[in-house]
Image (cartoon, rainbow, N blue to C red):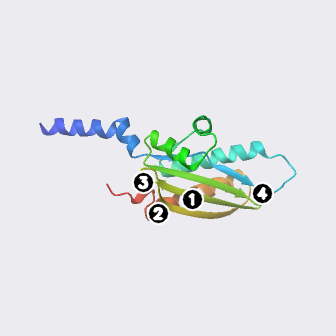
Amino acid sequence: MRPHAFVLALAATLASPAFAQAESLAILPVKLLDTSHEARDQAQDHERRLELLAKVLASGMAGQRIERTEVERACSPQTTDCLVKLLRDRGAERGLFVVVQKSSTLILQIFADLVDIRNEKLLVHKELNFRGDNDESWRRAGAFLARQLEAAPDGASSRVR
């Protein structure tokens, strides 16, 4: 094979959806456990902030977000086995599972698990406390969490191929 033909073939392979999909990080919809018992209905604010957090994580970790409707169609109930199978069927190499617990307007905590989908192995577990139930606090918490996951051993940036 001529050198430039090899380079073109390699470039086509690396750019192919199958190759990109095999290297992918899939980010499941962020879940919320609200134990704050606040009187005001905050459902719309919560939905917006869950979406914001997922977008920040996907951007910071070069991940592909899985839409909530796709998860609901594929996994009812949403068991771990079903979610892992969904990500595996989509060709994801790693999956990010995130839950936010809201204790009050001031105190929130994020639990994040980065999982090797092929081997069903936990790669990284992070817990992050943050303050303030507003868009900016959620955005900053997401950016910080993405950096923490990227920097963790076995995290997103430590893959060796």
Residue situated furthest right in the rendering: 39
State yes or no: discs 2 and 4 in contact (Cβ < 8 Å): no
- How far apart are the alpha carbons under marks 1 and 4? 22 Å
Residue situated furthest left in the rendering: 2
Mark number for residue 119? 3
- Disc 4 crowd, CA 10 A, few/some/many (<14, 14-19, 20+): few
Location of residue 161 (image quadrant): bottom left
Helix, strand or loop under label 3: loop
- Disc 1 crowd, CA 10 A, few/some/many (<14, 14-19, 20+): many
Q: Mark 2 highlights which residue?
A: 151
State yes or no: discs 2 and 3 in contact (Cβ < 8 Å): no
Earlier residue among tags 2 and 3 = 3
Amino acid found under the numbered disc labelled 1? Leu
- How far apart are the alpha carbons under marks 4 and 3? 34 Å
- How far apart are the alpha carbons under marks 1 and 3? 24 Å
- Disc 3 crowd, CA 10 A, few/some/many (<14, 14-19, 20+): few
Amino acid found under the numbered disc labelled 4? Thr
Q: Mark 4 highlights which residue?
A: 35
State yes or no: discs 2 and 1 in contact (Cβ < 8 Å): no
Helix, strand or loop under label 4: loop
Relative image position of residue 66 (x, y in whole percent): 55, 41
Q: Residue at x 51, y 41 (%)?
A: 86
Give the foreground label among 1 and 3: 3
Earlier residue among tags 2 and 1 = 1
Q: As displayed, is residue 132 above or below residue 51?
A: below
Amino acid found under the numbered disc labelled 2? Ala
Relative image position of residue 53 (x, y in whole percent): 62, 50
Give the foreground label among 2 and 4: 4
Q: Mark 1 highlights which residue?
A: 145
Helix, strand or loop under label 1: helix
Q: Quadrant of the N terminus?
A: top left
Amino acid found under the numbered disc labelled 3? Asn
